[in-house]
Image (cartoon, rainbow, N blue to C red):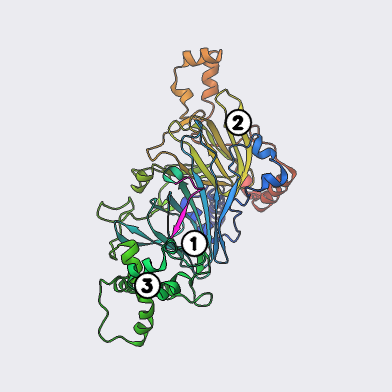
Amino acid sequence: MRSNYLLSLLTFLLALLVVFHGVVPATARRQLEEEEGEWDWGRRSEDDDDKKGRSSRAQGEERFLLQRSKQIVKTEAGEMRVVKSVGGGRIVDRPMHIGFITMEPQTLYVPQYIDSSLILFVRRGEARIGSIYRDDLVEKKLKTGDIYRISAGSTFYLENTRERQRLHIVCSIDPSESLGLGSFQSFFIGGGTHPTSILEGFNRETLANAFNVTESEVEEILNKQRGGPIVFVSDSHSPSLWAKFSQLKEQDRLQQLKRMAGFQPAPEEEDEQEQEQEEITWSWRKLLNSVFGTRIEKRSRGSGRGGSSSESPDSYNIYDRSPDFQNNYGWSVALDESDYIPLKHSGIGVYLVNLTAGSMMAPHLNPTATEYGIVLRGSGRIQIVYPNGTSAMNAKVKQGDVFWVPKYFAFCQISSRTSPLEFFGFTTSARKNRPQFLVGSNSILRTLPNPELAAAFSVSEHKLKRFTEAQSEAVILPMTGETAPPMKKEEKKVMKFDLKLVRVPKVIKRFGD
């Protein structure tokens, strides 16, 4: 009886250790799917500085936080905001904007192409994305954690397929191929009075001849859409061509597109449903043939590494990947071109880091790439150092904040005492990133020869060795009471409350250490 009781207590203790010593990516995804709170999505606008004067955060030590955002799209069905990168200059090897897309259930971001390449990261929800790849229409289903690339100039559409869940997407926007007309420039294929289709720029006679229809039919198509770039596709909100199309099953939808494009003749005897669809068929057929110039074809699913040269690239789920590094204080994942081939075309890498409460990413530097990060969950602090050894930034960050770190600059991320810190981001190189750590068991200070390094610090070799080898952990380190920043009263209250919940029974204490 006593042995069973002791076994139960040990099991309980082990469970507590699992809870306190970190999470794995699969758990992180499950937490995202269960979260109820909404994001701020970088809602600090460009006009804030003009209204209140340039803030101390913008001109002070927090200059590596990207705080200026612009609302690109806003409708009842959703919105898109863009956090702008800093201007050009030698310190910015490659500017990158960060986009935040929010879409209500059963909504559509209408077909368009833009002058910048995108790398999408599904923060929460499920989506269906259709894009033109090598003159074919390809549809992919995306879920939480998926990463997917859209090249500049490639026509695409995005749909939130969930009935009761919003879709949140974070994306990198690479302006290297842009026209320089803003953060990026959208060219809408579908549209009407709002948004305006690029077809609207041609006169009616030209379009009537091109589509082989009457001018009145052209007028009817180009003036009907008034809902904006993001629209509802459910009948309860807005009965439309897209609503009927999206309600078809996947195979039926692709077959219908083939028929609309004129590659599959309709049966001689059509039922009533097909007759109803016939009135909208002509616009799709002409649009796909004249504008896309495409042959609709269902492709086989590509591999997680991007598919072969004859297949369309697939998505890559970052939460399904085992951590590249993991210990009791957190984990990290980094994707490069060898993991996901489409990253090679953009020249951009992707990473995800989770720090448990009261831990830190050891001070390090990136010798090949600038890093852009978005805080997905929790709060903490980021410290960046100038080349001359002075502090460039020591700023608090919270969920939704965007930061950037130039290559060569030393920096570290620290989670708060009361919550983990999870951040996702992009790097400006698709090659394998080899960060140089300044502290820890894998530190470059341990690799350098002791005599030369001791002379550089003007201390004895023995003293230097004790100093550099005191830390036994690597990459992600614990924060001791002496090194952790002082807690505020609010944090102490939360900590005290947490300790009450996990107070160890006296019977366990009797077993000693």
Residue shown at the point (52%, 24%) measured from the top left: 468
**Which residue sits at x=29%, y=53%?**
307
Mark 3 highlights which residue? 283
The first of marks 1 and 2 along the sequence is: 1
Q: Which residues are magenta?
A: 179-189
Circle 2: residue type: Ala
Question: Residue 188 colored magenta?
Answer: yes
Q: Position of residue 393 (x, y in %)?
A: 61, 34
Q: Which residue is mark 1?
A: 125
| Residue 65 picture location, percent across and down | 59, 40
Tell which of 340 and 139 is nearer to you.
Answer: 139
**In the image, is residue 235 part of the stretch drawn in magenta?**
no
Give residue 55's quadrant in the image: top right
Between the residue at mark 1 and the residue at mark 2, the CA separation in whole angstroms equals 37 Å
Image-based side of 258 in relation to 465, left or right:
left
Front-most of 441 and 92? 92
